[in-house]
Amino acid sequence: MLMHLQDFDKMFNAMDLLQRRLLATPSGYETGRPALSAWNMPQAGPSTNLYDKGENLEMTIEVPGMGKDDLNIKIQGNYLEVSGKKEPDTPEGYSAHRVERGTTAFTRSFTLPAEVDSSKVEARLTNGLLTLILPKAEAAKPKQITIS
Amino acid sequence: MGEHANIIPTEEAMPERGRDIPQIVPLVDIYENDDEILLFADMPGVDKNDITINIDNGTLSLEGIRTMQNSGAVQWEEFGDTAYKRSFSVPQTIDVAKVNAEMKEGVLRLHLPKSEAAKPRQIEIRTA
């Protein structure tokens, strides 16, 4: 079997690349946060969950340190936009040892899997978690079909 | 059917997830003035009853457990049950008896007052 030296080089290059990927500790490792998403882009905005409960969708968003006045929710059809900003809570007359939390503003937008009845949306804020209950529009609701 | 009978008892034998919960190091801000050290820690979704704060032998350890009650079909999930854990070295000058903590909007505020002996003191110079 004959192989060009070039072929070996190609193979080793691929191996090097994989090894670098493996050894590179993602910067989010320490905090447990996925700092880099699958597309190697920094995650914009807070983490969210979305659940489908049949009649409605439920979304939870991590918003520590934000009050209800700091948050803005916009819904149109199946488009949802959540934005918020954190007021700095740096106390007066203190010197800082560590500032990791920062004061950030974010906007995150989502395409929901179903149309939402925006007039019946409910939003709750508990312990720094924002919960949105998004009732599906009549057309998007699951329907039982009886066999005649 | 016989298989189902085997499956159910194993689920009951593990009612708690215990060590499965992923650990996260919460982000903190630490400030200090003449009277106290003030610590903020982001722990969204943690109830104040699920937080334990220990000060032992110069080590302050924080732990907060978040348990999510979720139902329904998952469309996407970026966070879940979490144990927020972090520990710090604190100076011996902290008055452990006066430490107090409050939880607001998912942020823990921990006040660590300095003991009287450790506070800076202005010394007046008397004229002889």
Image: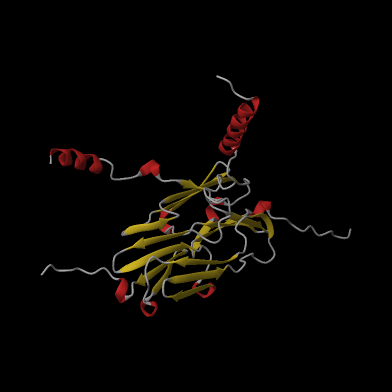
Instruction: Identify which residue is drawn at 37% across, 68% down.
Output: A114
Q: In the rendered view, would you say A3 is above or below A137? A: above
Residue A104 picture location, percent across and down: 60, 64
Q: Residue furthest front?
A: A2
Q: Nearer the viewer, residue A137 or B90?
A: A137
Q: Is residue B82 above or below residue A116?
A: above
Q: Residue at x 39, y 77 (%)?
A: A118
Q: Residue furthest left?
A: A148
Seen as rendered, the residue at the extreme bottom is A119
User: Which quarter of the figure has residue B20?
Assistant: top left
Locate residue B13 relative to residue B48 in the image: left or right.
Answer: left
Res. B61 visible in picture: no
Along the viewing direction, whichever of B114 and A29 lies nearer the viewer: A29
- Across and down, in percent, residue A44 comes to 56, 60
Give me the residue at 63% from left, 48% from top. Answer: B93
Does residue B107 lie above or below A73 as drawn?
Answer: above
Front residue of this view, candidates B122 and A12: A12
- The answer, for residue B123, to whether it is visible in the render is yes
Residue A13 vertical position relative to residue A116 in the rendered view, above or below: above
Residue toward you, B128 or B115: B115
On-image quarter of the C terminus of chain A: bottom left
